Image: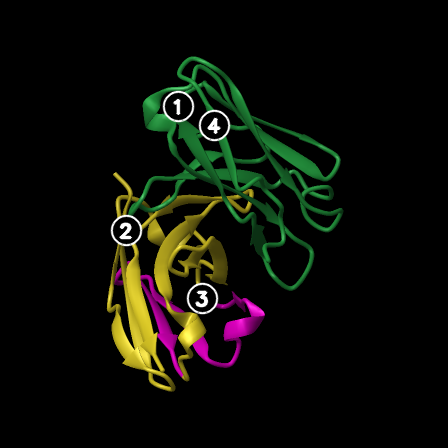
Chain colours: A yellow, B green
Amino acid sequence: EVQLVESGGGLVQSGGSLRLSCAASGFTFSSYWMTWVRQAPGKGLEWVANIKQDGSEKYYVDSVKGRFTFSRDNAKNSLYLQMNSLRAEDTAVYYCARLGDYAQFDYWGQGALVTVSS
Amino acid sequence: QSALTQPASVSGSPGQSITISCTGASSDVGGYNYVSWYQQHPGKAPKLMIYEVSNRPSGVSNRFSGSKSGNTASLTISGLQAEDEADYYCSSYTSTSTYVVFGGGTKLTVL
């Protein structure tokens, strides 16, 4: 059974940093692109970042470029999202998800809430 | 403002069929067959229901179907059931700098 479990969410002041983790199991982690998608309270979904199987390619939504860093450790079946210079508009539930061959997010974690206070 | 346009809400009675539209542009929905649909119950993570316009993942009921015409994709749910009440989001690959764009979501109410 595919499982994705996020951790590391919490309350942080504007301008601060936070690191999210996502532990994967139930599939060959190193064979898949992975992604982060976020959802602000009461709002819709927003794609945040993708990372290639070996971590050699990463893509980010414009609003987080230069502030967020997506990485992975295939030996530990884990993903990391380092978030710096956080802003109030980054407040959201952050989901890690597995990326399929047709730009679909086929498995999702339960989400980690990040709250940025101003 | 979301890149893809969905109706804010739709409703139907048990047993009926409903269709949710998702309108984009030639740079996303119209240009690629990489349209997906997600179901999200309150407080839960989204669940993939349709990918590549009309394909259902294993385990998803055949009451859910997808289609596309031009810049508009559609999700149809037939034989509505109480458990179908949820928010539904469409997404599409896009040729812009944003990899995937989402619709704003549609709240389905089963009357």
Amino acid marked by disc 3: Gly
Q: Quick check: do tags 1 and 4 share a chain?
A: yes
Taking the spot 53% from the left edge, 39% from the top edge, the residue there is B36
In this view of the protein, which residue sits in the foreground, B84 or A27?
B84
Residue A105 drawn in magenta: no
The residue pinned by badge 4 equals B11
Q: Is residue A44 visible?
A: yes
Residue A62 drawn in magenta: yes
Q: Does A26 appear above or below B63?
A: below
The residue pinned by badge 1 equals B111
Taking the spot 61% from the left edge, 41% from the top edge, the residue there is B34
Distance from disc 4 to disc 2, alpha carbons, whole Å, reads 27 Å
The circle drawn on residue A110 is 2
The residue pinned by badge 3 equals A55
Q: Report if the CB atoms under discs 2 and 1 are less than 8 Å apart.
A: no
Magenta residue span? A56-84
* Residue furthest out toward the front: B111
Residue A38 as seen in the image, left or right of residue A18: right
- Where residue A103 sits in the image (x, y, percent)? 54, 47
Residue B40 as seen in the image, left or right of residue B28: left
Amino acid marked by disc 1: Leu
Distance from disc 2 to disc 1, alpha carbons, whole Å, reads 28 Å
Q: Report if the CB atoms under discs 4 and 2 are less than 8 Å apart.
A: no
Q: Does A109 appear above or below A91?
A: above
Pointer 1 chain: B
Q: Report if the CB atoms under discs 1 and 4 are less than 8 Å apart.
A: yes
